[in-house]
């Protein structure tokens, strides 16, 4: 592979105009296709194999059209202090608003709260439901503005009016200014690392091009494959982070090869053949982990995983082709300014911060190992109390009208009002369907934790009914989860008594079922990913202990990052610093995301760091000295890559959507723990303690395993560097043309 990529780098360098125009053409083509593509569909949240989904499917089958995905707006009215919504003037304002809303474009109907008895017992709160004929994504500006004008008129009359539902829901931002700050921090890190504007800008430029290609492709293919920009959130996050890191490694190796006296084209070939090989392997691990999300069996998760995997593939291809092509245009611009001017360094160093740190760890491996393991273990403790769920309007900032509507309904009608349970009764086999539904309704109403059950609503055929049960606790309360389990556990006795069957669904039950499915899939997925890590690293490093050490370190970083996510988003420690106004269960898909993505990132750092250590060991250095040599050449680059990853991920903490905020924080924490604690401290400590044993492999296994030349030994032997003095801290000493 290294030899093949060596030629790819040389070809891209030589045919730089062709390669550059090819990527510009690709971007233009997908951009043009995106402008002509129909609007992306709503992702939805279909969840095959769970009871809530079965009940929803039964509802669609027996009540055609009633389960349509039309948008809705729940308008909540709060009377001024000391007044009631039933007062003559307030009642007239509310009825006028409902009449006005019902006449709006795309509106299917509006329900008067006084006719539907949607008024709280104390008379201070009421709500009206406005149903639309089309999904929220298809609502026109005219339809939204008509409803907003009607609401503004009611507010002008003195009522407090808030709007829940999805019709006018605030669209989540992907990070905003905070994301730009992350990119700016990445640029500063690159500039400090390279000491050259060109070297700092090149990884940013190629990463942005890669994200642009990926995101426009998602838009262009959205209607064909059911993708949307929500599916592409993870793709943009990983595409940007991986794109910068991968280009960073290639540019860094190019500068190193130039410092050895190689001509620019030869240096580009060597950089792509060596660092590029590691990029291919690292990208492959990320792609496998992301594509593996499809085995969980959740369509939305599968889409997010596959689109993100596609973005990483684009990042790898750009790194192997466009980066050496751009180096061909400015072969000396990426070198440090002093070196570009032909000056030699003021002094020659045989040491740098990376080698000094490695030497410290090698001298005290056991204390460093114990400190790292105990520290990460302590951070991982809260993960044992992990509670999964799906955040709703209660997790949104109080600045949004959806959150204020949620709070007002909870205050006026009880905490369980925002998450009613929908009971779908299948009375096809019952002798008396109405009596059967009545029995089910009464038994559920008698269940502890149920406040009320609505009258049964039958379909036209009379063989199915729908009930709505309101819990006494909020949708995310653990007691609500127990209530759903109780209602389902009593099913056999109730069905035997009534002669009909029933299923429990609704947003609350759906969230509970989704959380359970993710929780059940987490351990098997973790086992698969860890097993895959061991196998892949076995191929790369031809060692048994190194892969095992890498997998255990990966587990530590994953558990520690899960622990801090629980501490912040579930316990609330420091939540206000991140703009988290409401704590609660951790988003159901968060642990799966973390396991898959951190696996890829952990393997990135493992490969780039340990491959240089192994390279030094293979060339005859003693184990301890090989660790120092590996850190001397790659330590600074790995630190820079980790800081860039953290900056990009941390930028998404500024998102208003709690899901994006949580993913960004979790990934930033995972990179911090894995790069700086596991790879930079625990890994050299373990290698120092193992010594030569770290690189041993049984003879029979050595014969069976394929040879993967990540370090590029073959091309290094075939194309040795010319003799030239090299400064280890500033290796770009020779400007061969």
Image: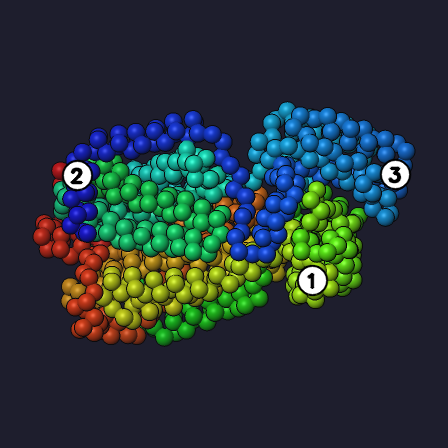
Furthest residue in direction right, as rendered: 88
Q: CA distance from mark 2 to mark 3?
A: 79 Å
Badge number at residue 406: none
* Residue position marked by numbered label 2 in the rendering: 11
Q: Nearer the viewer, mark 1 or mark 3?
A: 1
- The first of marks 1 and 3 along the sequence is 3
Residue 478 in picture, x, y percent from top left:
66, 62
Label 2: how many residues lie within 10 Å, few (<14), some (14-19) or many (20+)? Answer: some
Q: CA distance from mark 1 to mark 3?
A: 42 Å
Furthest residue in direction front, as rendered: 431
The residue positioned 52% from the left and 52% from the top of the image is 48
Q: Nearer the viewer, mark 2 or mark 3?
A: 3
Q: Are marks 1 and 3 in contact (CB under 8 Å)?
A: no
* Residue 142 at least partly seen: yes
- The first of marks 2 and 3 along the sequence is 2
Residue 327 in picture, x, y percent from top left:
23, 38
Q: Quadrant of residue 444?
A: bottom right
Residue 461 in picture, x, y percent from top left:
69, 44
Q: Quadrant of residue 691?
A: bottom left
* Residue position marked by numbered label 3 in the rendering: 86
Label 1: how many residues lie within 10 Å, few (<14), some (14-19) or many (20+)? Answer: some
Residue 456 in picture, x, y percent from top left:
75, 49
The residue positioned 39% from the left and 58% from the top of the image is 599
Q: Is 470 placed above or below 170 here? A: below
* Residue position marked by numbered label 1 in the rendering: 495
The residue positioned 19% from the left and 57% from the top of the image is 709
The residue positioned 61% from the left and 45% from the top of the image is 61
- Helix, strand or loop at label 1? It is helix
Q: Is 693 placed above or below 611 here? A: below
């Amino acid at each position: 592979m290294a030899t093949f990529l060596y030629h790819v780098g040389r070809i891209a360098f030589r045919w730089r105009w062709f390669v550059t125009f090819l990527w510009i053409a690709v971007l233009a083509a997908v951009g043009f296709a995106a402008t002509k593509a129909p609007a992306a569909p709503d992702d939805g949240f279909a969840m095959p194999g769970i009871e809530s989904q079965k009940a929803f499917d039964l509802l669609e089958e027996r009540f055609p059209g009633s389960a349509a995905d039309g948008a809705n707006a729940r308008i909540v009215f709060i009377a001024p202090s000391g007044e009631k919504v039933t007062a003559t003037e307030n009642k007239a304002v509310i009825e006028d608003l409902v009449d006005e809303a019902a006449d709006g474009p795309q509106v299917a109907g509006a329900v008067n709260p006084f006719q539907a008895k949607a008024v709280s017992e104390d008379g201070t709160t009421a709500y009206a439901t406005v149903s639309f004929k089309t999904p929220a994504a298809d609502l026109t500006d005219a339809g939204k503005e008509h409803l907003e004008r009607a609401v503004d008129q009611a507010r002008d009359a003195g009522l407090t009016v808030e709007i829940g539902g999805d019709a006018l829901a605030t669209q989540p931002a992907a990070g905003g200014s905070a994301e730009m700050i992350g990119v700016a921090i990445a640029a500063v890190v690159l500039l400090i690392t390279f000491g050259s504007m060109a070297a700092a800008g090149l990884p940013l430029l190629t990463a942005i091009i890669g994200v642009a290609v990926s995101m426009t492709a998602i838009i262009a293919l959205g209607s064909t494959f059911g993708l949307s920009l929500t599916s592409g959130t993870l793709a943009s996050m990983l595409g940007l982070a991986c794109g910068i890191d991968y280009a960073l490694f290639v540019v860094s190796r190019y500068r190193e090869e130039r410092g050895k006296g190689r001509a620019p084209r030869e240096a580009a070939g060597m950089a792509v053949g060596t660092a590029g090989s590691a990029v291919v392997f690292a990208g492959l691990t990320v792609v496998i982990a992301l594509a593996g999300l499809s085995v969980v069996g959740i369509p939305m998760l599968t889409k997010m995983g596959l689109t993100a995997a596609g973005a990483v593939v684009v990042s790898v291809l750009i790194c192997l082709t466009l980066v050496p092509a751009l180096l061909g245009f400015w072969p000396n611009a990426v070198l440090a300014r002093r070196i570009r001017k032909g000056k030699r360094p003021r002094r020659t160093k045989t040491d740098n911060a990376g080698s000094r740190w490695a030497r410290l760890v090698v001298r005290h491996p056991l204390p460093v190992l114990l400190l790292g393991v105990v520290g990460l273990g302590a951070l991982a403790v809260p993960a044992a109390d992990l509670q999964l769920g799906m955040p709703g309007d209660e997790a949104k900032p109080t600045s949004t009208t959806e959150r204020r509507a949620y709070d007002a309904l909870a205050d006026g009608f009880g905490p369980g009002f925002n998450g009613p349970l929908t009971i779908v009764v299948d009375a096809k086999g019952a002798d008396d369907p109405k009596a059967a539904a009545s029995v089910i309704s009464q038994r559920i109403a008698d269940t502890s934790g149920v406040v009320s059950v609505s009258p049964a609503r039958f379909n036209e055929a009379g063989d199915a009914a729908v009930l709505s049960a309101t819990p006494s606790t909020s949708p995310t309360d653990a007691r609500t989860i127990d209530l759903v389990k109780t209602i389902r556990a009593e099913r056999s006795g109730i069905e035997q008594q009534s002669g009909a069957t029933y299923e429990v669904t609704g947003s609350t039950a759906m969230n509970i079922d989704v959380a359970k499915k993710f929780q059940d899939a987490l351990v098997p997925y973790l086992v698969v990913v860890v097993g895959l890590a061991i196998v892949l690293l076995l191929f790369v490093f031809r060692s048994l202990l190194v892969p095992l050490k890498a997998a255990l370190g990966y587990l530590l970083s994953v558990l520690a990052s899960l622990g801090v996510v629980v501490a912040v988003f579930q316990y609330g420690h420091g939540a206000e610093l991140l703009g988290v106004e409401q704590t609660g269960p951790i988003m159901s898909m968060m642990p799966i995301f973390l396991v898959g993505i951190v696996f890829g990132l952990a393997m990135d750092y493992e490969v780039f760091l340990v491959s240089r250590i192994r390279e030094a060991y293979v060339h005859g250095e003693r184990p301890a000295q090989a660790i120092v040599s590996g850190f001397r050449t790659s330590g600074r680059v790995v630190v820079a890559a980790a800081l860039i990853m953290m900056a990009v991920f941390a930028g998404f903490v500024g998102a208003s959507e709690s899901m994006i905020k949580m993913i960004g924080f979790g990934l930033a924490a995972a990179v911090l723990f894995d790069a700086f604690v596991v790879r930079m401290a625990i890994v050299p400590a373990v290698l120092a303690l193992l010594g030569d044993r770290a690189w041993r492999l049984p003879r029979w296994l050595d014969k069976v395993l394929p040879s993967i030349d990540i370090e590029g030994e073959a091309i290094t032997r075939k194309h040795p560097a010319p003799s030239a003095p090299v400064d280890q801290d500033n290796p770009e000493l020779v400007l061969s043309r």
